[in-house]
Image: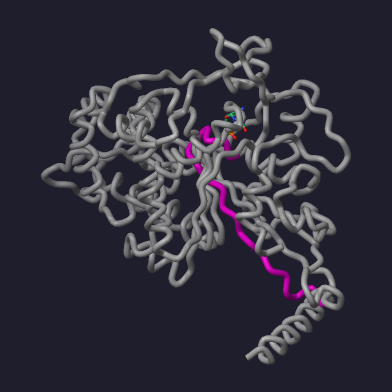
Amino acid sequence: MVFTGITDGIARGVEGVQASVSGIFEPTVRLGVTGLSRAGKTVFITGLIANLLHRGRMPQLTAAREGRIETVYLQPQPDVTLPRFDYEGHMAALTGDNPHWPESTRSISELRLSFRTRPDGWFAGWRGPQVLHLDIVDYPGEWLLDLSLMEKSYAQWSEETLARLERRAIAREFLAAARAADAGLTLEEPVAQALARSFTDYLQTARQAGWSDCTPGRFLLPGDLAGSPVLTFAPLPRPAEASRSSLWREMERRYDGYKSKVVTPFFRDHFARIDRQVVLMDVLGAIHQGPQAVEDLRRVMAEVLGAFRVGRTGWLSSLLGARRVEKILFAATKADHLHHEQHPALTDITAALVAEAKGRAEYAGAEVGAMSLAGLRATVEEVAARGGESLPAVRGRLMETGRTAVMYPGALPADPARILSPARGGAEAWLDAEYGLMSFAPARVTLRPGEGPPHIRLDRAAEFLIGDRL
Ligand code: GDP
């Protein structure tokens, strides 16, 4: 047995040498980065890339600590039709003379980072350097919510959506327009456009009000599809009769087009090819907003993560085949709003928030982790004295005024149930606590050679996600 192991190793070693000489076999890991709007995807990816290129602040990435990473470089991405993640632009925003937060993710984008590493262990001496390509794919979590449309017809979707909207005051205006439209009449484009606009307005308001079921996802983040017919439809009451040229039939055709031309290609060409996934969540932001926002985040995440639940829908499993995501990391972002003493509590709340989805992913064979991190650390830690008490706080430059402020956001409970139970129970406010939050601007940094911008746990995140492949 031992002998077989060694010959295997030699065989692979020889393969490796040939491969690096010929350049044929260069393994690739596709890392998906998702999360709802404003979760921190852009900042996370920018910080991660910068700190992988310059690894002075990455001690927990084993290959970096052991000095096995010879070089890391940006390369042209393989998908020439996808927008490139604007790493340089975002870095300039974060680390320029007047540091500011970069523009957020609005669509899908990609970037390839390549590693040249020395293998460890017994064969290191004669195996030669290895190349690993890391394709980072950034996409809005909202797009995953569209999975729920795939097995519904336009008639079913319309009926269900309208029934749900009946119970919401914020939908009144759209509902009145939908009821007033006779979908049996011949299509008139301005009517279709007005209905779609009114429905989109409702979705925007619903999202701001904290509702999770804001599909179709591209109505909120249209990318380059804004104004196209696949986004110019709305749920309508079914007319008694609908001829081929009726508004109803055209809306149906567009809805089907949305599924086949927008949702399917995204899942087939991008989602299905992801090997490892980070799901970012602004847990602190939700806690600050209150129990309803936490419950809403829990519900949306359960929905978003349904996409990783193998066997959830016939449609998705037929598309994915035997492929599955190997690792999923759930990460609470913006942890620099907290002193590190409070990070374990934030991580526990995050893990509890996604516990249901996590259980399912583990069942499906993916390795799952949870942590708290910051793509860019905008604060420094400080112990604040308040009323004779010493509080673990942070200090940063306020976004609004540019002035320095010290923040102690309140004690996060060690038991996540103290947050999740009131949220599930429909509480309006936290009973015994208040969680304040300030918006800090990125601090001005002077980067020393070999160092990326300051962060929290990007090295641990990288170790979890790709450490085994370096
Ligand atoms: P996206 O929509 O998921 O791409 O979100 P962004 O990465 O653009 O982040 C949204 C906002 O959250 C930023 O403009 C910042 O205000 C804030 N933010 C994101 N990451 C961090 C972080 O690591 N630390 C702090 N303090 N704020 C962050």
Q: Is residue 306 left or right of residue 222?
A: left
Closer to the camera in the image, 236 or 345: 345
> Tag count in the figure?
0
Residue drawn 70% across the image and 49% down it? 60
Ligand 1 appears in which quadrant? Answer: top right
Q: Is residue 43 left or right of residue 156?
A: right
Q: Judge whether residue 200 can be spotted in this image.
A: no
Q: Residue furthest front?
A: 388
Closer to the camera in the image, 309 or 419: 419
Residue drawn 40% across the image and 19% down it? 433
Question: Which quadrant is the C terminus positioned in?
Answer: bottom right
Q: Is residue 438 above or below residue 351?
A: above
Is 312 magenta? The answer is no
Q: Is residue 44 above or below residue 72?
A: above
Residue 385 location (% of width, % of height): 60, 12
Q: Is residue 468 left or right of residue 127?
A: left
Residue 51 location (% of width, % of height): 74, 44
Range covered by the magenta-colored residues: 22-41
Closer to the camera in the image, 217 or 326: 326
Residue 251 location (% of width, % of height): 30, 44
Residue 245 location (% of width, % of height): 26, 47
Q: Is residue 39 above or below residue 382?
A: below
Q: Which of the 4 image quarters holds residue 274?
A: bottom right
